[in-house]
Image (cartoon, rainbow, N blue to C red):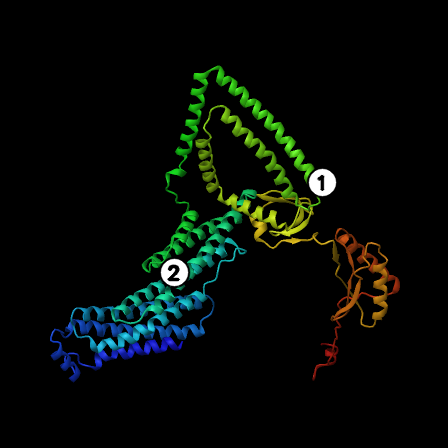
Amino acid sequence: MPLRGIFLLLLILGFSQVSAQDVNEPATEQVVEVVAEPQVKPLSQADITRLENEAATFDRNLLALDDLESRLNSAKGLTLEVVQIRFDRRWIKTLRDAIGYATFVADRRDDGFDTAVYEEAVIEILKLLPQAVAEASDRIASRAVLPDVSKSAADQAAIDQKFFAAVALVNETNRVLLEAIAVARRFDLDVAADEAYIKNHMIDTAKNASVYLDIAKSDVAGLKASTAMLPEDAELRAQLQVAEVRVKQIASAIQANLDLMATLNIETAEFKQQLVTATGEITSSVFEFDVVRGLAADAGVLFLDTALEKGPDVLFKIILFAFICYVFLKLSKLVRAGVERALNASDAHISRLLRDMILAISGNLVIFVGLMIALSQLGLSLGPLLTGLGIAGFIVGFALQDSLSNFASGLMILFYRPFDVNDTIEAAGVRGRVSHMSLVNTTILTFDNQRLIIPNNKVWQDVIINVTYQTRRRIDMEFGITYDQDIDEVFELLLEVVNADDRVLEDPEADVKVGSFGDSSVNILCRPWVKTADYWNVYWDLNKQVKHAFDARGIEIPFPQRDVHIYEERLVGGSDSDEGKV
C-alpha cells in the first residue's frame, strides 16, 4: 500500500520536527515573526509535551500496523478475518489521531500561539488524508459479502454479522473524512473535490442501501408466505427471523448514513420516506382506526335519523334500494355473459388470468355503480362515504403491503404473459403444470400430483422456464458403443429407429453425431425433434427401441472395465517354503 507508506512517512517526519527543533529557541525567521507580530505567543511546555506524547502514540500505532500487516500475509481463514478487522480499526484510529493532532495545532494557532513549526507537516497530512480514507473505505467495502438467502439461517446470520460490521467501519471512515475536511478548511485548503467525492459516495451508498432494503423486504414477504403454507418448518421460521432482523439493520445503516448526509445539506427526503414505509412508523392521525370508525358511525346515525323522521318515505327508499341492487345484480350477470361471449368470439389471444380479471371487473363494476346509486336514493352523502372507504382502503393496503407486492407481481405476469393456465413451467424452485392463476398467487400441480400455491412475488422474481411455450422440442439422447464398432452402421441404425416413429418430425430432421470419446466408449449423440406434448413418451420409447435394435444387430453398449495385473516374485534368500509368496 504505497499511499499508506507515504502517509505514515509524513507522520514520522512531521512529528520528528517536534523533538528535532527546540520550540523555545526559535530560528532567525521565527525571531523576525515575533518582532513583526508581537501578539504571537510561544507554546507552553504542556502543549509541547502533549505533541511529543502524540508522536509517541503514532510510533506505537505504526509498529502495530506493521505487525498486523505482516500477519495479514500469512494468516488464513478465520484468523485472517480477525487480523483484517484489527488492522482496519487500528488504521482508522491512526487517521483519527492525525485529525486530532491537526485540530490541536489549529486550535493553538487560532488562540494566538506560534505553531508555524508544525503547520507544514499538518498541511501535508491533511492533503493525504482524503485519499487515505477513500482507500481504507474501498478496502473494507471489498470484503463485505452480501447475504446469500440460499444458505441456512445460521449461515445467513453469520454473513450478516460480518457484512454489517464492514458497513459500520465504512460509515466510520466517512465520518473521519468529514472531520478531515472540516479541519482542512481551518488551514484554508481547497476541499471542493473532497466534498464532491464524499457527497457522491454517500448518495451512491444510500441508493444502494435503498435497493438492498427493497430486496430484503421482498425476502421477508416471500418467507412470510412460505411459513404460512408450511408453519411447522423450523428452518423457514428461522430464516424469516434473520430476514426481519436484516431489514432493521439495513434501516439502521441507512439512518446512520442519512445523519452524515444531513451535515452536508444533502436532500434525504426520498430515503426517509422509504424508512417510514419499512419501519411502519406512521404518526398521522388520518391513519388511525378511530377516524374510520367515526366516519362509519356518522353514516349509521344519518341513516337511522332519516328512517325515523321520514317513516314511509324511508321504507319506500329501502324498497327502492333493494330493487336497484337486485336490478344491477342481474345486469352484472348479463354484462359478464356479454363480455364472455365477446372474448370467446374475439381472435385476440389473451391469457386466462387476463380473461378472468376482465370478467370479474366488468361484473363487479356494474354492482359497484348500482350500489352507489342505491345508497344515493337513501339520502346518504357519497362524499364522506367515499372518503372513509379511501382512508380505510389505504390503511388496509398499508397493513397488507406484502400482499400488495404479490399483487404487483401478478400484474407483471398478467401484462407480460410468461405463462398461462395448463402450461408446464419451472419457477420458484418448482416444476409442474399451472392449474390456476390469480393476481396474488399461482397454483401449480406437480407431476406427482401435489398442489402448490406460490406467491406471485416469488414466481416473478425467479427465473421462469415455460416448457410448453414452444410447439416443438429437441430430444437429446446419448449412446455409448465400443471402439471396434462400425460408426456408420450405428448412425444408419439410429436414424432408422428414429424415423420409424411417426411422432418424430421430418422438419427439422433428426441429427446423429459423434459426441465424445470416453474411457471405454465412443459416445454417439442422437437428436430428433418432436411435438412438445410428445416429448417424454417419445424419449422413453426411443430409448427402449434403440436398446432392442442394438441387441438385434449385436452392437455392444460398453461398461467401464479395469484390468488387474498380479505379479509374483520369490523372496531373495528365502527357503523353499517362501516360494509363491507375494
Residue 80, percent from left and from top: 44, 68
Give the residue number, with chain letter if any, for mark 1.
Answer: 345
Residue most extreme to the top: 312
Residue at 33% from the left image edge and 60% from the top image edge: 264
Q: Nearer the viewer, residue 427 or 82?
A: 427
- In the image, residue 338 above or below residue 51: above
Q: Which quadrant of the structure image shows residue 10?
A: bottom left
- N-terminal of the pair, mark 1 or mark 2, is 2
Q: Nearer the viewer, residue 514 or 127?
A: 127
Residue at 44% from the left image edge and 20% from the top image edge: 306
Residue 460, percent from left and from top: 58, 51
Residue 421, percent from left and from top: 67, 45
Residue 331, percent from left and from top: 62, 29
Q: Quadrant of the C terminus?
A: bottom right
Element at label 1: helix
Q: Which quadrant of the structure image shows residue 439?
A: top right
Element at label 2: helix
Residue 150 in the figure: left or right of residue 7: right
Q: Which mark is residue 168?
A: 2
Type of residue at label 2? Ala
Residue at 52% from the left image edge and 46% from the top image edge: 405
- In the image, residue 436 above or below residue 138: above
Q: Nearer the viewer, residue 412 or 51?
A: 412
**Label 1: how many residues lie within 10 Å, few (<14), some (14-19) or many (20+)?**
few
Q: CA distance from mark 1 to mark 2?
A: 63 Å
Residue 422 in the figure: left or right of residue 490: left
**Label 2: how many residues lie within 10 Å, few (<14), some (14-19) or many (20+)?**
some
